[in-house]
Each structure stands twice: as C-alpha cells, then as structure tokens.
Amino acid sequence: MRLRFRTSLLALVAGAALAGAAAAPAATTIDRTLRCTGAEQGGVAVFTLLASPTGQPDKKNGKLIVPPAGFRPDPSVSLVTGLDQELLTFSSLEAGYSVSQSGCTRTKAKVALAPRKLSLNTNAVGGDGKIFNWRCIDVPALLLRIHLVSDADGVPLIARIALVNARTKRPLAYLNWARSRLKAYATLSCTHI
C-alpha cells in the first residue's frame, strides 16, 4: 500500500510538472538576411557596430519589469550608419528588437553565421566592462544576417550576427552574443574605436 501511494504521488508530481512545462510560453527565433545601405559621414559611407553583454533583464515575481515610457536601456547590440541612423538594435534589458525599414531590405543572399577568417577582437564576460565598438569606412552597403533567440517574454537571449561587404562579399564582422558573454570578430581593414 505504501509503495503504491509513493508511486501514485510521484506520477502525480511528474504529471503536474509536465503540464506546467507544456503551458509555459516558448522562446522565439528569427533568422533574417538583410541588405543595408550606408549613410555618408564626411563624404564616405560609415557603419558602426557596438556590442556588449548587458546582463539579465529586471524581473519582479517572475514578470519582466517594463521600462517607463520614453526610457531606453543601453543597447546590447547596435548597428548604426552615418552619424546616427540606427539599422539594428536590441537590448537584453527589454523585450523586442528593431530593424530599420528604410535602411535595410530583405535579401536571399547567403551569409554564413561564422567568423570566416576574421580575427577575434573582443572576448567579454558580463561585468568586465569590455565592449566591442567597431567602425568600417567606405563600405556603401553591407549584408547583415541575424539569428536572434528571445525568451518567453520576448527579451533577447542569444544572437549570432554576421556582416559582409555587399560588393566584395568579404566578411567584415561576426558577433556571438549572449546576455552574459560576447565574442566579437572583425576584419583588420576596419577599426576598433
């Protein structure tokens, strides 16, 4: 009798755990390739890529704390062209991501999600203060592939991003980003600022 009670209790607990797991919202993944046009700064097209491991989002009682209206947390990843035209941005501190509809268009071009002969530039761990701040000059257009996984709240969890010169097809940068770590690779023809 005691053995049957324990077996039934274990089955009940396991069933409840499975039911709870089935009801939990799943993570979402996007995988897109875009062609982004460079805006000029000082007469040449300029792209600037900034990335850092910005940590875990704020939660209270398991729920995401939404920033007040008008407040934007520091980006985890930001791709800008010209002086300030944002092409891609997201933060591990808030839900969602943003891709410029005017600066980037979808493409069927193939872009590998790998460092492809690029040098490791930044190896950062959350809290160490390291950031990847890269600028490439005289690139009229680039191909951007982003593979982004967000948690059940829509907050970015991990991302792999590859940038390729649209004209020469040469790789420019590759990011392997997560909330608590970053590995960033870049061509030596672009500069770390």
Image (cartoon, grey):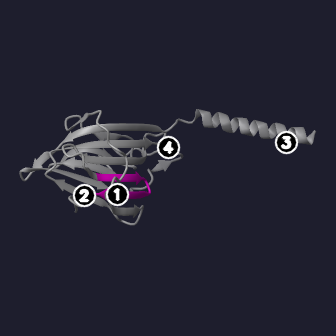
- What residue did someone put label 2 on? 134
Q: Which residue is mark 4?
A: 63
Asked if the residue under mark 2 is in contact with the one under mark 1, i.e. CB atoms within 8 Å, the reply is yes
For residue 6, the mark is: 3
Dot 4 falls on a residue whose secondary structure is strand
Judge depth for marks 4 and 2 and give the one in front. Answer: 2
Residue at 6% over, 51% down: 43
Mark 2 vs 3, N-terminal side:
3
What is the magenta segment's predominant secondary structure? strand
Secondary structure of the residue carrying numbered label 2: strand
Say whether residue 74 is visible: no
Dot 1 corresponds to which residue? Answer: 184
Membership of 182 in magenta stretch: yes
Indicate which disc, 4 or 3, sits on the residue closer to the N terminus: 3
Is residue 2 left or right of 15 when viewed as pictured?
Answer: right
Q: Quadrant of residue 23?
A: top right
Question: Looking at the picture, which amino acid does disc 2 mark?
Answer: Trp
The segment highlighted magenta reads 173-187
C-beta proximity under 8 Å, tags 4 and 2:
no
As displayed, is residue 66 above or below residue 178? above
Q: CA distance from mark 4 to mark 1?
A: 31 Å
